[in-house]
Image: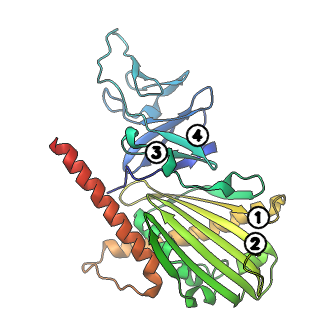
Amino acid sequence: MFLLNHGWYMAAWSDEVADGLLQRWIAGQPVVFYRTAAGAPVALSDRCAHRRAPLSAGARIGDEIQCGYHGFRYDCTGTCTQVPGQRNIPGSTRVKAYPLLERYGFVWIWMGEAVRADPALLPDLPWFEDPAWAHAGIPRTSLAAHYSLLIDNLLDLAHETYVHPTNIGNAAVAETPVTARLEGVVVTASRHMDGVDVAPFYHEVCGIDSPVDRWQDFEFRPPGTFLLHSRNAPAGSPADDPGFQLKVLWGITPESDTTTHVFLGTARNFAQHRQEISAGLSTSLAAIAAEDVAMLEQQQIMIATDPLGREVSVRSDAAGLHGRRLMKELLAQEAAGTEADQLV
């Protein structure tokens, strides 16, 4: 099951949605994306109302899409504007148009009922459009695993010690307890490590040496946005010293029950005009994402083939357990609402 009416999913980097037709499966549904001549992004269901051929295999005709099978044409609202060979167009000949928002370098999509699409539910991420912060990211990554495994992974950063030992991980991460909270529909957690060894990644990127005060404050907002506030500063720096800050944004967008789209971007408050730092960050992010993907894809196989389905939770799982309970409750709410709608 997928959350449809509890928030916005990252659908694409802004530069992925261009003049051509882009097909992307999101929450089990095929969606076709494109831009109008005025530059506005559009998202329609990628099944023609006639014989369900993919519209993404058709053609752009101005700001409309023409189905490549029988020539049915649809405008930006999903309304059919032309049926070859007849003037009368049945009222049911339309496809779903999905609400979109374009912010922070991404196109965000609301997969549920359009009347419930609330812009106020988009996460507030000012660093990712602030020119005083430098930005870097990597292309969308595919994960052959259920999206919940990536949520677990990000809410338990103790894994950095073992999955990412050559870049962001070191012993301090696993050894320092995490404080986790559930605040409304947002999971927040903190791990503050004072006077510890600097991780290789931060030594290379920031040019900072051990010891450091390293802080990890992070939050998860359903349906799939994770934000890490990372701060590294020389040991003993005042608490109000901004230090070297890196905001790490993950978009967790289910493609299907067994596959996930992964978006990963950063904003930083240092070396803002050094392009080599941005390039190096992108390379490092790609390596970190690849390490997570490799582990989670193996984990998916082990879970799918486990006849007992048992696992053990420990103290470092506190944030992840909050996330699991929250997602379970929200999915149950949507399921109950769907059932109620079917009874009307």
Closer to us: mark 4 or mark 1? Answer: 1
Q: Which residue is mark 3?
A: 118
Residues at marks 2 and 3, CA–CA distance in whole angstroms: 33 Å
Q: Which residue is mark 4?
A: 17
Q: Which residue is mark 1?
A: 269
Q: Name the secondary structure under disc 4.
A: loop
Residues at marks 1 and 3, CA–CA distance in whole angstroms: 30 Å
Task: Give the image location of residue 53, x and y in percent.
Answer: 36, 32
Q: Residues within 10 Å of mark 1 (few under 14, many from 20)?
A: some
- Name the residue rendered at 30%, 29% in the picture: 51
Q: Residues within 10 Å of mark 3 (few under 14, many from 20)?
A: some
Query: Which quadrant holds the C terminus?
Result: top left
Task: Give the image location of residue 187, x and y in percent.
Answer: 47, 69
Residues at marks 4 and 2, CA–CA distance in whole angstroms: 35 Å
Counting residues from the start of the chain, the first of labels 3 and 4 encountered is: 4
Task: Give the image location of residue 192, x and y in percent.
Answer: 62, 83
Dots 1 and 3: beta carbons under 8 Å? no
Closer to us: mark 3 or mark 4? Answer: 3
Task: Give the image location of residue 209, x and y in percent.
Answer: 80, 84
Kind of residue sitting beneath label 2: Pro
- Name the residue rendered at 60%, 68% in the picture: 228
Q: Name the secondary structure under disc 2.
A: loop
Decide which of 209, 177 is in the foreground and name it. Answer: 177
Residues at marks 1 and 2, CA–CA distance in whole angstroms: 9 Å
Colouring scheme applied when the structure was drawn: rainbow
Closer to us: mark 1 or mark 3? Answer: 3
Kind of residue sitting beneath label 1: Asn
- Name the residue rendered at 54%, 87% in the picture: 177
Tell me if I can see residue 145 in this picture.
no
Label annotation for residue 242 = 2
Counting residues from the start of the chain, the first of labels 4 and 2 encountered is: 4
Tell me if I can see residue 127 in this picture.
yes
